[in-house]
Image (cartoon, rainbow, N blue to C red):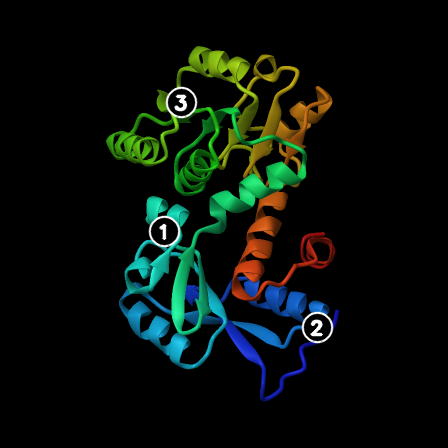
Amino acid sequence: MEQPNITGHTKLIGLLGHPVDHSMSPAMHTASYAHLGEDIVYLSFDVEPEGLKTAVDGMKVMGFVGANVTMPCKTFVGQYLDELTPAAELMGAVNTVAIRDGKAIGHNTDGAGFVKNLELNGVTIKGAHVTLIGCGGAGSAIMTQLALDKVAKIDVFNAKDQFWDATLDRVAKVAEKTGTPIELHDLADKDDMKACALASTIFINATPVGMAPNTDGCVATEDMLHEGLAVGDTVYNPRETKLIKMAKAKGLTACGGLGMLLQQAALGEEFWNGAKMDTKFIEENFYN
């Protein structure tokens, strides 16, 4: 892989969060920019929520191109930014900051990366009827982006636990702000899930079910997967979950979680400086 050539003109992108020493993002984005011939490097900075204002102000003063924001800072950083995109504002979370003309603009690429991956696989988003399993961090972001992108309806299935009322509020807020009909259902009601899946054109798993080492797990049964249904999963380890294998066996369009991960990264680089990440290069060098 190409190595960065550090010069007096080299620009910085940062990762803000705690802890960050395990992240692959610095190596991945720095390699991506070197591959593209861009004079940019990406470094991680261990920052907790109480240090975010200082960090954001410092990046603006020092001419950073932008930053990624990870846990536990994603829900705190927005208050210190100059602008938020509609998705970031609705989600109440920012994972990507672009700095332009001294202004810090907050984005959220979680849902956008997933939707972009669906679109690249030929899935029509506008007007779709979606069954979404899970409304945690990833599921909530996907729900919000789908609503902003004008799907016809979203049936969300989530565990009926101590967070149920908060999830109801989140669903109602997104539905009100976007005008998209969204209904929350009990994850335990498999007959209801089957009925929704059979009426849908897109079925999405946004839970950890199926993730290694528990690769036998699956949120759907085979009789939920019908002709014309597109299936997406947020899990990327393994590359093909049981859900994705079932969908492919039925000849359905099936999009695994790695595509979402790559498109999130690509969107970040596009927001930062308009770069077009070579996602195939990244996949071959970091995810094989």
Distance from the alpha carbon under mark 1 to that under mark 2: 31 Å
Q: Which numbered tag is attached to residue 37? A: 2
Q: Are marks 3 and 1 in contact (CB under 8 Å)?
A: no
Residue 162 in picture, x, y percent from top left: 26, 32
Which image quarter: residue 223?
A: top right
Nearer the observer: mark 1 or 2; the answer is 2
Q: Which residue is located at x 67 percent, y 77 percent?
A: 4
| Mark 3: few/some/many CA within 10 Å (<14, 14-19, 20+) | some
Of the numbered discs 1 and 2, the one sitting upstream in the chain is 2
Front residue of 215/264: it is 264
Which image quarter: residue 56?
A: bottom left
User: Is disc 2 placed on a helix, strand or loop?
Assistant: loop
Q: Horizontal placement of 110 versus 61: left or right?
A: right
Quadrant of image for the N terminus: bottom right
Query: Mark 3 belongs to which amino acid?
Result: Leu
Query: Mark 1 belongs to which amino acid?
Result: Ala
Residue 71 in picture, x, y percent from top left: 39, 56
Of the numbered discs 3 and 1, the one sitting upstream in the chain is 1
| Mark 1: few/some/many CA within 10 Å (<14, 14-19, 20+) | many
Which image quarter: residue 61?
A: bottom left
- Figure check: 111 above or below 269: above
| Mark 2: few/some/many CA within 10 Å (<14, 14-19, 20+) | few
Q: Which residue is located at x 46 percent, y 24 percent?
A: 152
Q: Horizontal placement of 281 versus 12: left or right?
A: right
Residue 105 in picture, x, y percent from top left: 40, 62
Query: Mark 2 belongs to which amino acid?
Result: Gly
Q: Which numbered tag is attached to residue 93? A: 1
What residue is shown with label 3?
A: 187
Nearer the observer: mark 3 or 2; the answer is 2
Q: Are marks 3 and 2 in contact (CB under 8 Å)?
A: no
Q: Which numbered tag is attached to residue 237? A: none
